[in-house]
């Protein structure tokens, strides 16, 4: 059973979603998923990051300004969704 606590990275466009998936998957285990309905500002594609990988994901995003400025991170805990500042 999957954990109900995770992080999701959402993007301004599918271009950045695909670029981020390729970039992050070189160092992390990532899962592409549809964006949650509670998150309205997105292209519809998101990347799921498990809690143990979030610090590394943020570090990688901070090292890639092109993807960073076109993405947003949300913490999901059961039905609660909270935006995280990069």
Image (tube, rainbow, N blue to C red):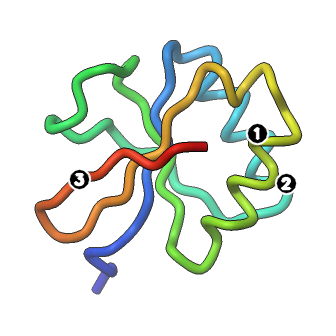
| Residue 70 drawn at (x, y percent) | 60, 20
| Residue 83 drawn at (x, y percent) | 36, 45
Label 1 CA crowd tier, 10 Å (few <14, some 14–19, many 20+): few
- Circle 2 or circle 3, nearest the eye: 3
Q: What residue is drawn where x is 52% and y is 55%?
A: 31
Q: Quadrant of residue 66?
A: top right
In the picture, measured across the screen, residue 54 lies left or right of residue 78, that is right
Taking the view exactly as shown, the residue that stands out farthest to the front is: 85
Q: Are discs 1 and 3 less than 8 Å apart at CB? A: no
Q: Nearer the viewer, residue 4 or 55?
A: 55
Taking the view exactly as shown, the residue that stands out farthest to the bottom is: 1
Q: Are discs 1 and 2 less than 8 Å apart at CB? A: yes
Marks 1/3: CA distance?
A: 25 Å
Label 1, on which residue? Answer: 22
In the picture, measured across the screen, residue 58 lies left or right of residue 72, that is right
Instruction: Tell me which numbered mark, 1 or 3, is placed earlier along the sequence.
Output: 1
Marks 2/3: CA distance?
A: 27 Å
Label 3, on which residue? Answer: 81
Q: What residue is drawn where x is 72% and y is 26%?
A: 67
Label 2, on which residue? Answer: 26
């Amino acid at each position: 059973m999957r954990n109900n606590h995770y992080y999701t990275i959402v993007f301004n466009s599918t271009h950045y979603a695909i670029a981020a998936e390729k970039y992050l998957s070189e160092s992390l285990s990532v899962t592409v998923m549809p964006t949650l309905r509670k998150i309205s500002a997105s292209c519809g594609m998101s990347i799921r990051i498990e809690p143990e990988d979030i610090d590394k994901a943020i570090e990688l995003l901070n090292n890639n300004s092109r993807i960073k400025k076109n993405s947003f991170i949300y913490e999901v805990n059961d039905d609660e969704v909270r935006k995280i500042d990069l």
